[in-house]
Image (cartoon, coloured by chain):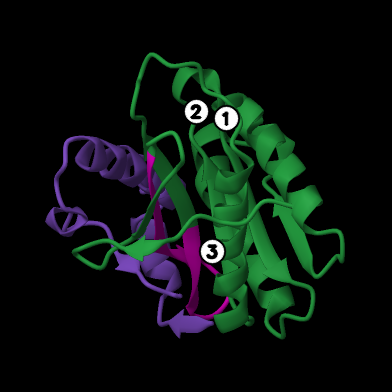
Amino acid sequence: MKKFNSSRSTLKKNAAENPFKKLMDDKKRIEAAFKNGKPLSTLNEVKFVRPI
Amino acid sequence: MYGPYDVDVTLDGNGYQFISARGDHYLVYFTAFFLTQEVGADIEVVSFSFTCKRADEHAHNRHDPRVKATLRSLVEQFFEKNGDNALLYLCMNDNRSARSRSITFSRWFNESNKDQRYERYKSPTKYAKLGFYSSLILKKANPNREAILAAFNYTIDIYWGFETGL
């Protein structure tokens, strides 16, 4: 489990940026890229990980 | 018991893929997701997702047990290597299907967890009316269990609560 520094002020500033909504948007972008044959590496705003 | 399909890493290394017997092309991918703690640093967990490009978009979507076995195998490999982390699963709500997907996911999880090695925590039902259905899976023996669960619930409440006033 990785931890990253954060602060309450950062949280308040970004309160409207719901990370679950961002994930939903990312999933839509990934699905569209996959179905159109575009490499996932073109989606710079998505942080892919390879845990296995 | 059906065996999984052979899985390859995608050419750009950002996902895993396999082809089903019917020629459907599956992409499985993991992305970083940051949970907010009430006090302290964010916790990075991993979001698990998959999508499918069907060989025949008009064909009836028949159940393929080997697809389920393949996805299950990838999840088990994740926990073999990341036993102190957690997997987040978010049901998409296109065609208002998030609830149905959540039910399917519950069934898969229960079938795959007969030995009760894993625990699943669902997002509160009060946010379901927004089409938000999410789950967090972790090993029962996860040493970070309490911190991760608290952060999961806190993150949901601050962001969905912010939107709904709940």
Q: Could you say which chain is coloured purple in the image?
A: A
Q: The disc labelled 2 sits on which kind of residue?
A: Asn
Q: The disc labelled 1 sits on which kind of residue?
A: Ala
Q: Which residue is mark 1?
A: B98
Is A8 one of the magenta-colored residues? Answer: no
Q: CA distance from mark 3 to mark 2?
A: 24 Å
Task: Tell me which secondary structure the magenta stretch mostly adopts.
Answer: strand
Q: Kindly identify which chain the residue marked by label 3 belongs to.
A: B
Visible in this render: residue B164?
yes
Question: Which numbered marker is on residue B93?
Answer: 2
* Furthest residue in direction right, as rendered: B115
Q: Which of the two labelled residues, at mark 3 and mark 2, occupies the earlier sequence position? A: 3
Q: Kindly identify which chain the residue marked by label 1 belongs to.
A: B
Q: Nearer the viewer, residue B14 or B67?
A: B67
Question: Which numbered marker is on residue B74?
Answer: 3
Measuring from the top left, give residue B144's x and y in whole percent. 67, 82
